[in-house]
Each structure stands twice: as C-alpha cells, then as structure tokens.
Image: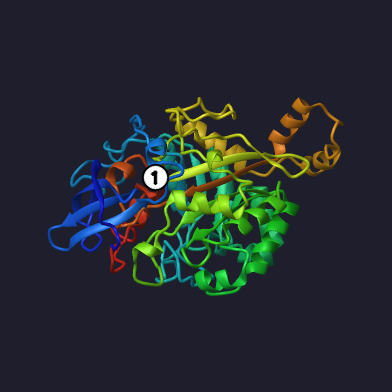
C-alpha cells in the first residue's frame, strides 16, 4: 500500500491469513500516519498492509475496547488445525450467537457485479424442507432459538418460503429477517402478504442508493423504482424495512446522506439503514487497492457531513458484543415535527459509552440474548396504530412531553448502523473469535459469517461449497 511511511509501533498482535494461500500467519494492528492498519507477512507471498481505521473522530482508542470472553453454549466441532479452519463452531470461539443466516437457495434473479455469495454461478439444488428442519433443530441443540435471516442467493425465488418461516415459528424461533433484492416482492404483493402471514418480521432490503447509476454499477440494472415500490408495499402489509447499502468508494459513498433522508421520509415503515462497507470476498469487479476500502470512521464522517450534522458523530456507539472494528450504531426517536432525537451517545473522554435507551447497562458488553431482543424490537414493524398516533400527536401541547416521548418510543424509533465484514486481506482471528453472526453450512455446521464467505485472491473459498 502507498503513502504510509510513519510507523508508531504495534498496538496489538494477532493472527490472520495470507490473501493468496489462506494459510494462517502472524499479524499486528499498527499505527501509521495517524491511522490504524493490519500488518502481516506471508513467507511465500510477501508483505501486506491493510487499513482498518482511517480518521480521528471518533478516536480508535476510545472506540475499540477489550471484551470479556463469553462461553459458547454448545461447541459443535472438535479442534484440529485451529481458527479459522475448525469453524463449526469450536471451543475457541468466544461469543455466543446472535443472528444466524439460513441460505435457502443459491439461485438469484440478478447477476450483480458485487455479491458476497457469488450467487447464481453454480446450479445447486435448494435444500428441502426436511434439511431446513434439521438446521432449525441444530440451532436449538446449540443454544437457540436465535434471530434468523433468510438469505441466499435470492430467497424469494423459493415458492415455499412462507412454509419455511411457519416451520421455524412452530419450533420456537420468533424473529425472521428476509435478506432480499425485493424484485419478486414488488411484482407479487400477495407473496409478501403470505410471508407476513407466516410470521416474517423484517425485510432487509438491498438498497445501494437514491440514484439509478448506482444500481447500474453495483447490481447491473436500474432497479431503483422497484426498491421504492417494495417500501410502499411493506408499509401496506405491515412489514418493517431496513435499507441495506453496500458502500463502495467512488460509487455511492457520497450518497449516504440522501439514503438516510429517504429512509427518514418513510418512517415508521423504514426502521433503519444498515450500511455495509464493501468487503472483498465472493464476487467483486476489479483489482483491490487501498483506495477501494472504506473504514468505519470514514463511513460515520461521511454520514455526518452529508446530513449537515443533523446526525452527529457523538450519536454513534460501538457494538455491545462485537469488536469495535466490526460495527457502529446510532438510535433515534422521530418526533412529530420530524426531528430525530438521539438515544445513544459515545463519550470520547470516558471509558464508558453513555446510553439512555435502558436496553443495556452503559459501557457494558450486553448479553447476546439482550442484543437479539433489542434488534427484534427495533427492526420489526411498528404497531398498527402508528400512523394514527402520528397525526394525533402532531400538534404541540396536545400531550405532555413524557406521554408523547413514550408514545414515540413505541412506534417511531430509527436506527443508523453498519457492519464491516472481514475478508482475506484484513481478517483478524482475534476479532473473528468474537463473531456472533453465523451461517448454517449445508452439513449443519455453524460458521462465523466472515469465515464462511472468505475467499482468496483468486476467488477460492475457505468454507463455502466445501
């Protein structure tokens, strides 16, 4: 990588993998030129220096904190070669599970230039109902029920998707999130209704920008109108929506403020925006360079700038359970005049993060069950009376401030969050061991998301398809 010369020393040591041969190698987090990098050397393929944290606000030191190990409920895989090869998961894993992805199909109705799953490249039969029932049972045996994300490929290509949700509900799983491009939902509102009837909680809608050229570059088609129609239909069906942009430098990183504005205009149907800085695994369009990466503080800074500081940097906090380099979130309540009142705050000058939400003790690493419940409550659709309440409370002075605030908490919460996934270049095995987002592999193993999707520089996977 270029223009990085000043080295201030090693902050922490860890392990990673070589991006070319995927062999485990020593690594370190180092500070250079005021930024944080992962530094590593493969005996065969040479030296790598990858940006992890570029920016001064918030500071790396105030954001990234040590975590306590959480004993996994039921380790399922014996240890052999060690992390990341023994995922399944094993006794070395240090965090309980929060969210589990079920990849119910590898088929897709798009051929996106960017796709972490490389969907549609191979014809693989869909897992049948009995197989998926076995996956649910595996999750229950390993400490579940957990929050479920139905993914793929494009999961709506399965006509029996409502049956899969109903089956999970019957076994005790209560939160179902649909990871979708929305194309079938906008054409078949009755299918969306069937999903809602079966127990769907939230549509996790691929939504890369408010401009058509963005969708052309990242998805290969102009599908903005279809995305907007899905939001409208979900509002009519009573299904919550979270917009999920993949953030790519030079493509849509200057559109983040407009995405948030569109989301705010569609509260309470849209429950939040979940930004995902591009990670280089699966399918991506070009050779990788430092300029093609965007780190968490850069995403947060762009959000602040592009919203004219209506969203402030102090509104953002690190996760309660993930490593600080993995994620960020800011939670709000929308008041009747449209103002977003923050309920999260990060204090640069304190060892604690202040939070008035009451969901987690300030500064604590929350229990995964608390996090699961919190996500379910904030991303699911609001109550059916939300629109009525909005009109009833629109005039100041009609209700006292406490009643109004409590009413808004119930139906008008909004979240801006992000998740920075790891690839073969920036993989940190210490960080991976604290992952609480897992994928059920076809054989039933529970593998951390970043490990499952890891591919080398030639696109060869470590776990997926093996």
- Density class for disc 1 (Cα within 10 Å; few <14, some 14-19, many ≥20) is many
Give the position of the N terminus as an image quadrant: bottom left
Front-most of residues 442 and 394: 394
Question: SS class of the residue under badge 1?
Answer: loop
Tell me: residue 233, above or below residue 147. Answer: below
In this rendering, does residue 95 appear at all? yes
Front-most of residues 313 and 400: 313
Instruction: Look at mark 1 in the image and give the residue it sits on.
Output: 325
Residue 292: x %, y % from top left: 40, 64
In this rendering, does residue 170 appear at all? no
Tell me: residue 67, above or below residue 237. Answer: above
Front-most of residues 457 and 63: 63
In the image: residue 164, left or right of residue 298: right
Residue 384: x %, y % from top left: 76, 42
Residue under the point 38% across and 64% down: 291
In the image: residue 7, left or right of residue 364: left
Residue most toward the left? 43
Residue 406: x %, y % from top left: 72, 29
Residue 198: x %, y % from top left: 64, 48
Residue under the point 59% across and 55% down: 306
Give the position of the C terminus as an image quadrant: bottom left
The structure's colour scheme is: rainbow
> How many labels were placed on the picture?
1
Looking at the rendering, which quadrant does residue 337 occupy?
Answer: top right
């Amino acid at each position: 990588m270029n223009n990085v010369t000043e080295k201030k020393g090693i902050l922490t040591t860890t392990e990673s993998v070589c991006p070319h041969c995927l062999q485990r190698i020593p690594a370190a987090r180092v500070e250079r030129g005021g930024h944080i990098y992962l530094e590593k050397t493969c005996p065969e393929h040479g030296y790598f220096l990858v940006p992890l944290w570029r920016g001064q606000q918030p500071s790396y030191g105030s954001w990234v904190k040590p975590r306590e190990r959480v004993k996994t409920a039921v380790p399922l895989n014996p240890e052999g070669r060690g992390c990341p090869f023994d995922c399944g998961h094993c006794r070395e894993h240090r965090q309980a599970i929060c969210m589990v992805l079920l990849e119910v199909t590898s088929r897709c109705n798009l051929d996106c230039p960017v796709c972490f799953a490389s969907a549609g490249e191979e014809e693989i039969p869909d897992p049948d109902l009995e197989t998926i029932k076995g996956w649910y049972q595996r999750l229950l045996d390993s400490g579940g029920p957990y929050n479920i994300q139905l993914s793929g490929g494009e999961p709506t290509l399965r006509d029996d998707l409502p049956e899969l949700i109903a089956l999970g509900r019957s076994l005790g799983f209560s939160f179902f999130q649909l990871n979708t491009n929305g194309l079938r939902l906008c054409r078949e509102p009755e299918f969306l209704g069937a999903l809602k009837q079966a127990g769907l909680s939230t549509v996790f809608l691929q939504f890369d920008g408010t401009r058509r050229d963005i969708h052309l570059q990242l998805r290969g088609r102009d599908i903005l109108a279809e995305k907007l129609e899905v939001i409208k239909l979900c509002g009519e069906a009573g299904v919550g929506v979270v917009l999920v942009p993949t953030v790519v430098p030079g493509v849509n990183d200057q559109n983040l403020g407009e995405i948030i504005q569109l989301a705010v205009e569609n509260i309470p149907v849209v429950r939040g925006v979940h930004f995902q800085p591009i990670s280089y695994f699966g399918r991506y369009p070009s050779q990788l360079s430092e300029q093609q990466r965007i780190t968490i503080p850069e995403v947060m800074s762009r959000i602040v700038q592009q919203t004219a500081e209506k969203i402030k940097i102090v509104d953002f906090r690190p996760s309660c359970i993930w490593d600080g380099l993995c994620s960020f979130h800011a939670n709000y309540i929308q008041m009747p005049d449209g103002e977003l009142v923050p309920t999260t705050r990060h204090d640069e000058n304190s060892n604690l993060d202040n939070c008035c939400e009451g969901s987690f003790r300030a500064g604590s690493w929350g229990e995964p069950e608390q996090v699961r419940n919190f996500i379910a409550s904030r991303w699911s659709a609001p109550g059916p009376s939300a629109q009525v309440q909005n009109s009833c409370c629109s005039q100041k002075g009609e209700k006292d401030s406490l009643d109004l605030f409590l009413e808004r908490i119930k139906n008008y919460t909004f979240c801006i969050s992000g998740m920075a996934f790891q690839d073969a270049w920036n993989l940190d095995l210490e960080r991976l061991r604290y992952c609480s987002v897992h994928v059920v592999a076809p054989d039933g193993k529970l593998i951390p998301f970043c490990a499952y999707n890891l591919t080398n520089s030639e696109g060869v996977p470590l776990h997926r398809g093996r």
